[in-house]
């Protein structure tokens, strides 16, 4: 699997400027050039929900590289978490999330 576009990412809200003037959220890589690179674009008309959920989803996606890095750092400490027997093992949950994010 190829590597994802490195962070940091941010989102920008706007409109597509087409006939529908649809709300759109762009997830962008903060590059070294004067222009950011668009990683993804989400159009409100392609989704179920409203503009507030579009922006909330865009913020979550933009945080993905930071979340992955933090989770990898926590997981590097190994299975040191305390949890109740009835709960999911947080270390195993973290490792599964990391594998999912990396396509493993």
Image (cartoon, grey):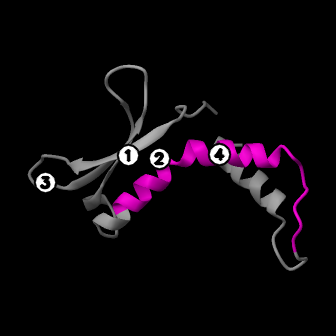
**Dot 3 crowding, Cα within 10 Å, few <14, some 14–19, many 20+:** few
Whether residue 75 appears in magenta in the rendering, the answer is yes
The residue that mark 4 highlights is 68
Cα separation, mark 3 vs mark 1, equals 18 Å
The residue that mark 3 highlights is 21
Image coordinates of residue 12 in percent, x first then y, are: 32, 45
Q: Which mark is residue 62?
A: 2
Callouts 1 and 2 close, C-beta under 8 Å: yes
Q: Nearer the viewer, residue 77 or 86?
A: 77
Which region is colored magenta? Answer: 54-83
* Image: 37 above or below 56: above
Q: Quick one: SS at disc 2?
A: helix
* Image: 40 above or below 44: above
**Where, quadrant-wise, is the C terminus in this rendering?**
top right
**Prevalent SS, magenta region:** helix
- Mark closer to the chain start, 4 or 1: 1
- Counting labels gives 4
């Amino acid at each position: 699997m190829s590597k994802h576009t490195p962070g940091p990412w941010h989102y920008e809200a706007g409109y597509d400027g087409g006939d529908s003037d649809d709300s759109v959220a762009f997830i962008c890589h903060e590059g070294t050039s004067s222009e950011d690179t668009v990683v993804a674009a989400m159009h409100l008309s392609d989704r179920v929900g409203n503009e507030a959920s579009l922006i909330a989803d865009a913020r979550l996606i933009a945080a993905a590289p930071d979340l992955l890095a933090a989770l990898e750092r926590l997981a590097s400490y190994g299975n040191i978490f305390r949890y109740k027997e009835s709960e999911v093992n947080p270390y195993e949950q973290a490792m599964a999330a990391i594998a999912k994010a990396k396509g493993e």
